[in-house]
Image: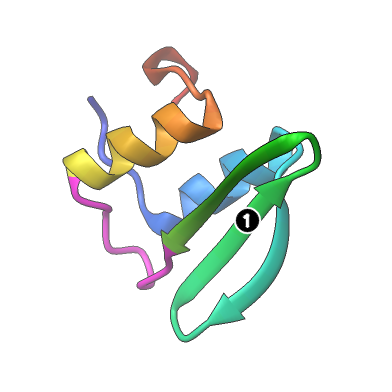
Amino acid sequence: MKAISGKELARLLEDRGWQLRRTKGSHHIYSKEGNPARISVPIHGSKPLKIGLQKHLMKIAGIDEKEL
């Protein structure tokens, strides 16, 4: 799996209808109408997310590896 940064994941979420609800420190909190889940994306410049966290967030958002 290709490692992506928090900024790139945030862009993917926004493209798929997730909306930025608030920011707390370096974490951006996203939610989507009709979906009870909230996604907290750490934005640390262009530093890549750890693979386990990335997979977890992508699973919640319904993003497939092929879409990267």
**In what element is the residue under mark 1?**
strand
Does 45 lie within the magenta span? Answer: yes
The residue identified by callout 1 is 30
Q: In this view, does 4 lie to the left or right of 10?
A: left
Q: Which of 26 and 5 is in front in this view?
A: 26
Residue 47 in which image quadrant: bottom left
Q: Nearer the viewer, residue 5 or 26?
A: 26
- Magenta-colored span: 42-50
Residue at image point 26% right, 31% down: 2
Q: In this view, does 67 lie to the left or right of 34?
A: left
Q: Vertically, is 66 above or below 35?
A: above
Residue at image point 53% right, 24% down: 62
Does 66 lie within the magenta span? Answer: no
Residue furthest out toward the top:
66
Residue 49 location in percent, x, y? Answer: 27, 53
Residue at image point 49% right, 49% down: 8
Q: Quadrant of the N terminus?
A: top left
Amino acid at the residue labelled 1 = Tyr
